[in-house]
């Protein structure tokens, strides 16, 4: 799918985020690095609230190993945004997410991203299978 043509309904999970005063840069719009924070926040909120990931105590945690973004039009403070999440690849120990950033109440996508997690053992940082309580939820969000 062409990322610029993605629509809100193409994503299975949505997380609302408010832009903050310090998100704006000298050009008067949300700085590109902030979008990566949006991606990380939305994905981890999904894993914690929908999949039961305990980021403080679970033996298996997820590391970001790759991320990228495309920007289509600017955001600025103050705006309410929604980050859509879906899964485009689910491997043995990794998951690739496609993310879309939308202004609340608007249909046009503002930015699109890809975010790859690898699940690892907290003690030795070695890759392990996606936890059995998380995999089924990720499978429901998987698209071709």
Image: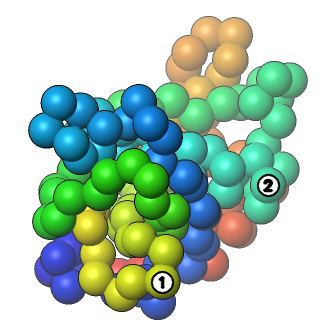
**Near-viewer residue (130 or 97):** 97
Distance Cα–Cα, label 1 vs label 2: 24 Å
Colouring chosen for the image of the structure? rainbow
Q: Could you tell me which residue is drawn at 56 percent across and 44 percent down? A: 41
Residue 84 shown left or right of residue 54 in the figure = left
**Near-viewer residue (31 or 85):** 31
Residue 101 shown left or right of residue 112 in the figure = right
**Near-viewer residue (29 or 110):** 29
Residue 118 shown left or right of residue 120 in the figure = left
* Residue 81 in picture, x, y percent from top left: 47, 63
Q: Could you tell me which residue is drawn at 26 percent across and 67 percent down? A: 110
* Residue 65 in picture, x, y percent from top left: 36, 32
Label 1 Cα neighbours within 10 Å, binned few <14 / some 14-19 / many ≥20: few
* Residue 142 in picture, x, y percent from top left: 49, 75
Residue lying farthest to the top in this orientation: 124
Q: What residue does disc 1 label? A: 105
Q: Could you tell me which residue is drawn at 29 percent across and 57 percent down? A: 75
Q: Could you tell me which residue is drawn at 46 percent across and 89 percent down? A: 9
Question: Which callout, 1 or 2, points to the residue nearer the camera?
Answer: 1
Does residue 87 appear anywhere in the picture? Answer: no
Does residue 20 appear anywhere in the picture? Answer: yes
Q: Where is the C terminus found, in terms of image quarters?
A: bottom left
Q: Secondary structure at mark 2?
A: helix
**Near-viewer residue (44 or 75):** 75
Q: Secondary structure at mark 1?
A: loop
Q: What residue does disc 2 label? A: 49
* Residue 51 in picture, x, y percent from top left: 77, 56
């Amino acid at each position: 799918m062409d990322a610029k043509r993605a629509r809100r309904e193409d994503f299975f999970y949505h997380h609302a985020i408010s832009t903050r005063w310090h998100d704006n840069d000298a050009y008067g719009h949300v700085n590109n690095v902030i979008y990566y924070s949006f991606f990380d926040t939305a994905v981890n909120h999904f894993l914690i609230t929908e999949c039961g990931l305990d980021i403080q105590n679970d033996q298996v945690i997820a590391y970001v190993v790759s991320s990228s973004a495309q920007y289509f039009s600017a955001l600025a403070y103050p705006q309410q945004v929604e980050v859509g999440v879906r899964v485009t690849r689910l491997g043995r120990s990794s998951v690739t997410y496609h993310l879309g950033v939308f202004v609340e109440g608007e249909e046009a996508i503002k930015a699109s991203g890809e975010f790859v997690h690898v699940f690892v053992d907290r003690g030795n940082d070695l890759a392990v299978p996606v936890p059995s309580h998380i995999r089924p939820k990720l499978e429901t969000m998987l698209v071709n």
